[in-house]
Image: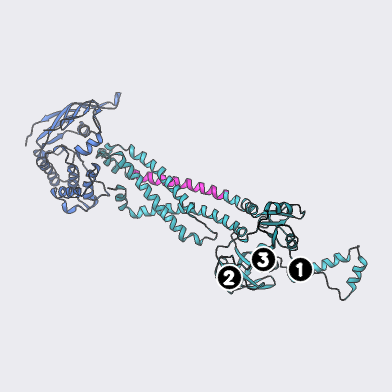
């Protein structure tokens, strides 16, 4: 006869409500782990997706995800000439915020190296990859953009031709993929007046230059003279892929001798990302999670202890009737385990149906579910121990006291 | 056949100025099929004797034999007292003390389960006992759905379920009106006669003394046998 189940049969509603409360707590413990995993996934998504062997960035910077890094696109050509290098492509990314219609959209623009990369490797949920080198973008669904929607960015308008899911930056912003040239144009866009002022400034500086001043003056007086154009937009990094058999370490060593750049392997770039972007969040989430686990433990202990106290009379009666201690232990422990199992069940349901609505990605794998499941098991077992100690101390003669 | 024999029981509570001698050399015997009453004012030691006989609160001195077997001697137990309680002693209390989350049927089966009897025959045994005690039609009801008299009948059925040689009842009719109280006492006599069980009842109700075969009176820890007047 399972006394625990028989008891719960009479208090289904209150027991379920208690389990739901615990489920919410356990769900937050689950969410904390999922948010951390989501952070790591988001942070490393691009590095993994782009598949470069070496990231070449501005000298002494940590790359485009850690800080501002600018390199001239012409660096591509120098790198292609390097022994062991199979390909080199510019890479630009930055987070921008624009008003589109009535919405304020925060997005991270990423340049794809046209024509090699048209976004074929992106996980599209609808639409298609880039077909045109200009004015087309693939956007993440989290941005709320629709297929075919026109996105005004800088001087141009871009049509959304494909939608991805779960492609977020380390900051949790949806990614927008365009060709590299378009990305650079978007990210370095200046208003026409700003460009004019900049050109005027350059002219003024040129006019004041003593060196070759006569010819400069002549040039300025010449009606056919057009002002110098602005420098081409810089990229944030150059992504290098090596020839088969080439040694990453050797190529990296060779590039380190260049005075204007720093070269990282993909793994180093990944580590920099995790240490820079995720580390503090990891510590904070870890601490918060530990606190939540402690709070959950205290709550479960109090609940189970009070459930045992509420059954003091029944336990005394069982003991008076000659019940073995194991019967009493089972009664308390089974209820603890049932409460934990039901609470954990609620937590899984919450994770399944509520977490996808969270603004940041909550990534839960089997390990996460198993880990929190084990934690719940340990918590309810320890919490039940408090109830069991209390139950075993109840004297059977309590019944006779009335 | 002696169901229970107690010899020269002594029990003291507290120390020094607060010392209370609850049992002073108490001896008694209850035979199979006999209904025994324990009378006495509050604080006379009746409940101490009952808990002593029930192996719940062993006396410091003296012996207790159940079915001719020594189970307690000068505070020392021979065997597992809890096991002896669940198999050889049935308890009935002032309040029915049924487990509230079990139906009448399950309350009776519980004591069988505690004695490791879990087969389908326990259903039959439980139903037979409830019918025997006149509450067969209430077997699926929970205690809160039963009247006080019905609850007491279910409690007696529970006490009888493992067929113990001894039933101890502590003021079982105190919460009942006189008519229902008498019915319960008569039920004890019926059980004793038909099941061969010895029933020891602590009672204040002098109107039902005619039901008992033997009457003991307790005063200041001393037990004496009283004459039946009715």
Please give the residue where the numbered disc 2 appears in the rendered image.
A162
Q: Is residue A291 magenta?
A: yes
Q: Which residue is mark 3?
A: A113
Q: Is residue A254 visible?
A: yes
What residue is disc 1 on? A194
Q: Earlier in the sequence, mark 2 or mark 1?
A: 2
Q: Chain of mark 1?
A: A
Which region of the structure is painted magenta?
A283-310
Q: Position of residue A225 (x, y in %)?
A: 86, 73
* Callout 2: chain: A
Q: In the rendered view, would you say B213 is above or below A301?
A: above
Q: Which chain is cyan?
A: A
**Is disc 1 on the same chain as disc 2?**
yes
| Mark 3: secondary structure | loop
User: Do tag 3 and tag 2 residues touch (Cβ < 8 Å)?
Assistant: no
Q: Is residue B220 visible?
A: no
Badge 1 vs badge 3, beta-carbon distance below 8 Å: no
Crowd around label 2: few <14 · some 14–19 · many ≥20 (10 Å): many
Q: Secondary structure at mark 1?
A: helix
């Amino acid at each position: 006869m399972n006394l625990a189940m028989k008891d719960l049969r009479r208090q289904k509603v209150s027991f379920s409500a208690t389990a739901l409360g615990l489920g919410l707590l356990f769900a937050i413990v689950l969410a904390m782990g999922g948010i951390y995993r989501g952070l790591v996934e988001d942070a490393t998504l691009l590095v993994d997706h782009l598949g470069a062997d070496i990231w070449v960035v501005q000298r002494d910077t940590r790359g485009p995800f850690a800080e501002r890094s600018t390199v001239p696109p012409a660096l591509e050509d120098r790198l292609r000439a390097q022994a062991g290098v199979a390909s080199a492509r510019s890479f630009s990314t930055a987070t921008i915020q624009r008003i589109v219609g009535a919405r304020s959209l925060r997005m991270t623009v990423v340049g794809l190296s046209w024509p090699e990369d048209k976004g074929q490797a992106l996980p599209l949920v609808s639409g298609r990859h880039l077909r045109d080198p200009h004015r087309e973008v693939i956007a993440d669904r989290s941005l709320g953009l629709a297929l075919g929607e026109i996105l005004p960015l800088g001087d141009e308008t871009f049509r959304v031709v494909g939608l991805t899911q779960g492609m977020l930056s380390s900051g949790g912003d949806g990614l927008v993929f365009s060709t590299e040239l378009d990305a650079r144009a978007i990210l370095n866009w200046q208003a026409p007046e700003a460009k004019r002022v900049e050109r005027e400034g350059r002219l003024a500086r040129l006019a004041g230059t003593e060196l070759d001043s006569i010819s400069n003056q002549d040039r300025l007086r010449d009606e056919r003279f057009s002002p110098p154009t602005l420098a081409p937009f810089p990229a944030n990094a150059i992504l290098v892929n090596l020839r088969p058999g080439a040694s990453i370490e050797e190529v990296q060593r060779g590039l380190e001798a260049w005075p204007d750049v720093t070269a990282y392997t993909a793994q180093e770039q990944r580590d920099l990302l995790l240490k820079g972007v995720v580390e503090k969040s990891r510590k904070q989430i870890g601490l918060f999670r530990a606190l939540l686990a402690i709070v959950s433990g205290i709550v479960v202990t109090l609940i189970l202890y009070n459930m045992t106290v509420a059954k003091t009379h029944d336990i005394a009666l069982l003991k008076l009737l000659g019940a073995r201690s194991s019967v009493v232990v089972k009664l308390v422990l089974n209820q603890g385990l049932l409460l934990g199992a039901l609470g954990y069940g609620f937590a899984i349901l919450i994770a399944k149906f509520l977490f996808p609505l969270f603004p940041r990605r909550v990534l839960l794998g089997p390990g996460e579910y198993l880990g929190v499941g084990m934690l719940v098991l340990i918590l309810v077992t320890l919490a039940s121990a408090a109830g069991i100690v209390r139950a075993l101390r109840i004297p059977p003669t309590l019944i006779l006291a009335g | 056949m002696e169901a229970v024999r107690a010899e020269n029981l002594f029990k003291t509570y507290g120390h020094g100025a607060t010392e209370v001698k609850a049992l002073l050399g108490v001896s008694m015997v209850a035979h199979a099929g006999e209904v025994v009453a324990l009378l006495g004012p509050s604080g006379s030691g009746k409940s101490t004797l009952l808990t002593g006989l029930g192996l719940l609160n062993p006396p410091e001195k003296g012996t207790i034999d159940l079915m001719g077997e020594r189970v307690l001697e000068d505070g020392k137990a021979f065997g597992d007292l809890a096991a002896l309680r669940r198999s050889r002693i049935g308890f009935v209390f002032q309040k029915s003390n049924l487990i509230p989350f079990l139906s009448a049927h399950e309350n009776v089966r519980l004591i069988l389960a505690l004695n490791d009897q879990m087969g389908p025959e326990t259903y039959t045994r439980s139903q037979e006992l409830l019918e025997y005690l006149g509450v067969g039609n209430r077997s699926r009801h929970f205690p809160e759905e039963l009247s006080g008299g019905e609850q007491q009948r279910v409690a007696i059925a529970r006490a009888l379920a493992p067929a113990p040689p001894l039933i101890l009842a502590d003021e079982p009719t105190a919460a009942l009106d006189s008519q229902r109280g008498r019915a319960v006492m008569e039920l004890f006599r019926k059980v004793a006669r038909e099941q061969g069980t010895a029933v020891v009842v602590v009672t204040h109700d002098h109107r039902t003394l005619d039901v008992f075969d033997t009457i003991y009176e307790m005063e200041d820890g001393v037990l004496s046998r009283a004459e039946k007047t009715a």
